[in-house]
Image (tube, helix red, strand yellow):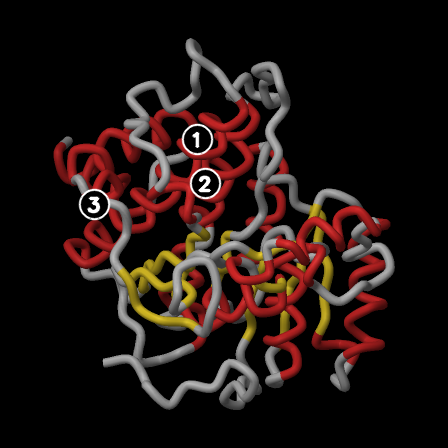
Amino acid sequence: MANDAWDPRRLPDLSGRTYLVTGGNRGLGYFSCEQLIGAGARVIMTGRSATRLQSARAALRKRVDADPSAIETMLLDTANLGSVRAAAASIRSRKKLDGLLLNAGIVHPPKERTTSPEGHEIVFATNVLGHFALAAELLTILASASGRMVWVGSLATKLTPYDPMDPELRTGYTPWRAYAQSKIATTALGLEADRRLRVAGVRVASIVAHPGYSVSGRTVGIRDVNEPTRGTRFTDSLQMPITQSKEHGAWSLVRALVDPTIGGGEFWGPQFGPRGEPKRGTPAKITREPAVGERLWEHCERASVPWPMSKAARRRRR
């Protein structure tokens, strides 16, 4: 049972723990890193730009009183499976990884359907496929620490009826549908991963968390990390009753990553839906459909890399 006395402003001591956060140089990823490091953890912060990663690292060093060696940066583009494999190989050479926050993503998709270097629809590739492959590549090192992976969902999963029968939108592409379906897929895969890990007896927890309605205009300004315009500040302030800052949006993600009382297969988000302290919730019905999870899993394994337990099952059948 989750700890009802949990205080997101005062995390437990995370000294000796190591976490990897994708998309850690901006937004929710950055504030998740800030909170983890502030509690004593070591963080591997990944992103697509070396310059932006260094800016974020400099901001962390300025805002958090922590050992500089606790903040590591690594290039990783989740839209590029070659980049995912290279980063995973580097991480597997480490001694330990306690948790994986699968946060990176495209929130504002392109107006027209665009593809990744491997030919996959870019939003699906970035938000879903790259994370699926990264989790597969790092499963062994996570299992050695009885660690966990957290998939980042969205309120969008409860605002759309889309069934991702065509997850890469070869027809019917719209920016909203691309984003919404990617988050339905992310949530369904996180729940499906929990089912498969349990069956295989792998000691890794798969959890889904969402940040509510977290906006940059209600978030502290940090150079090269969060720099909303005056217009954005004004617009976001008008939505104050239903929004929160990205610092607060990171609370649910971080709790899912570090609270030892949270188990695999759980779904966490802000208490009041778009805002509030972390609370256990119920994911959208479509994401809980086993057939949806199985279909997406099979698609992702064909498109990227099979998970270790899938490889083992195939060897047994031979």
Q: Where does residue 260 sit, x and y in percent of width and height?
A: 35, 80
**Residue 94: quadrant of the picture:** bottom right
Residue for badge 3: 288
User: Which quadrant of the rendered structure holds the N terminus?
Assistant: bottom left
Which residue shows up at 76% across the image and 76% down it?
A: 69
- Residue 148, placed above or below residue 225: below
Left or right for 259, reference 175: left
- Residue 167, placed above or below residue 208: above
The three-letter code of the residue at mark 2 reads Ala
Residue for badge 1: 304
Residue for badge 2: 133
Residues at circles 2 and 1 in contact by the CB criterion of under 8 Å: yes
Q: Earlier in the sequence, mark 3 or mark 1?
A: 3
Which residue shows up at 60% across the image and 17% down it?
A: 114
Q: Where does residue 68 sit, x and y in percent of width and height?
A: 79, 78
Q: Earlier in the sequence, mark 2 or mark 3?
A: 2
Left or right for 275, reference 188: right
**Residue 156: quadrant of the picture:** top left
User: Extreme top residue here?
Assistant: 171
The three-letter code of the residue at mark 3 reads Arg
The three-letter code of the residue at mark 1 reads Ser
